[in-house]
Amino acid sequence: MPLIELKELKTYFYTEDGVVKAVDGVNFSIDEQETLGVVGESGCGKSVTALSIMGLVPMPPGKIEGGQVLYYRDGNTVDLTQFNPKGREMRSIRGNEIAMIFQEPMTSLNPVFTIGNQIMEAITLHQDVSKSEARKRAVEMLDAVGIPLPEQRVDEYPHQLSGGMRQRAMIAMALSCNPSMLIADEPTTALDVTIQAQILELMDQLQEDFDTSIMFITHDLGVIAEISDYMVVMYLGKVVESGEVHDVFHDPTMPYTQGLMESIPSLTEATERLNPIEGVVPDPYDIPSGCPYRTRCPYEMAICRQKDPELEPVGEGHESACWLHIEH
């Protein structure tokens, strides 16, 4: 059963220089207890998609221009885009039923409050428990995410913890109310590879323990391969390929996905040069006509300059948006 389903979601930013279509007709779903990996270069709309789900898009200049974010809970379906982002309904869901871990914990944690106070605030805001019970729960969550001496750490401030410890504390805070879904926005980018591996292993274990669905945003395909069941590839605010991780990795059909795969360093062929994708993501104020990837694509055809391809099936549960695979 789907837990979250995005249907033609559009989130635009209106600026003095023009309109930025940060999310432009995105469709995908996340099932219960499933991990969906969302990958793409910077500026492709991954984080704005997450913020749209959470009702955290800054308005103005941002605005959800269309589409739906359907949330299935207790046999009912609600459209999160219809809630006032500052209203009671959305605040009761945000942090309680759908939680988010941000990329840099030092900028997300409040430096003047202890780790314990910040976790306790999330618990008491959404659950009818006493302060002593909230503190006990905070200690339990710090222990659950592998922080040593949790009874001591609960009274420490963010600057007293290492980067990996702060990220674990953020995960503890996000999971403190046992949410149905966890959105992780590049939670391992600022960490070294050893700590990154520990955090990924921790999230995999916590998903089993808490039966939580995860939307994992990253630019690292290695992380996607390790943690995700399904994956979505985004480019300039659109989904250009999606499917089971195994299918997309072994048979990428969109040239952008192929380029991302070819740019991954190989441990077995370390002497070979990497094949980076030529060029950069186009200016969002001046998106090319037709297929937005055509200016960097080695297979550009005449139709690519005229029409933007839609997602079409290229296998069971595997879709790609490329004119190479569409009859025209």
Image (cartoon, helix red, strand yellow):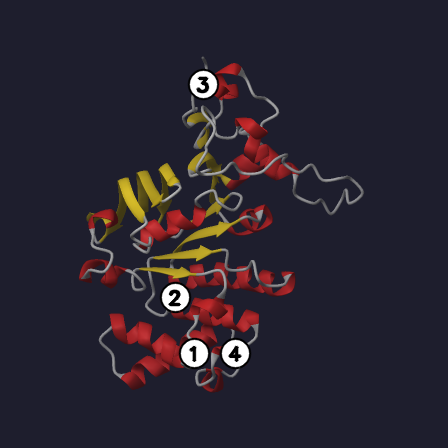
Q: CA distance from mark 4 to mark 2?
A: 19 Å
- Of labels 4 and 1, earlier in sequence is 1
Element type at mark 1: helix
Residue 1 in view, yes or no = no
- Of labels 3 and 2, earlier in sequence is 2
Q: CA distance from mark 2 to mark 1?
A: 12 Å
Q: Which residue is mark 4?
A: 159
* Total numbered circles: 4
Q: Amino acid at mark 3?
A: Gln
Q: Are marks 1 and 3 in contact (CB under 8 Å)?
A: no
Q: Nearer the viewer, residue 302 or 135?
A: 302
Element type at mark 4: helix
Q: Which residue is mark 1?
A: 115
**x and y, in percent, of residue 112 in the image:** 42, 81
Element type at mark 3: loop
Task: Give the class, few, some or many, for how many residues have Cα within 10 Å of label 1's Cα (few <14, many ≥20).
Answer: many
- Residue 260 sits in which quadrant? top right
**x and y, in percent, of residue 168 in the image:** 49, 69
Is residue 309 shown above or below 279? above
Tell me what residue is drawn at x 46 percent, y 32 percent.
287
Residue 319 in view, yes or no = yes
Is residue 196 shown above or below 139? above
Q: Amino acid at mark 4?
A: His
Q: Amino acid at mark 1?
A: Ile
The numbered mark at residue 174 is 2
Q: Amino acid at mark 2?
A: Ala
Tell me what residue is drawn at x 48 percent, y 45 percent.
43
- Residue 211 sits in which quadrant? bottom left
Element type at mark 2: helix
- Camera-near label (4 vs 1) is 4
Q: Are marks 3 and 2 in contact (CB under 8 Å)?
A: no
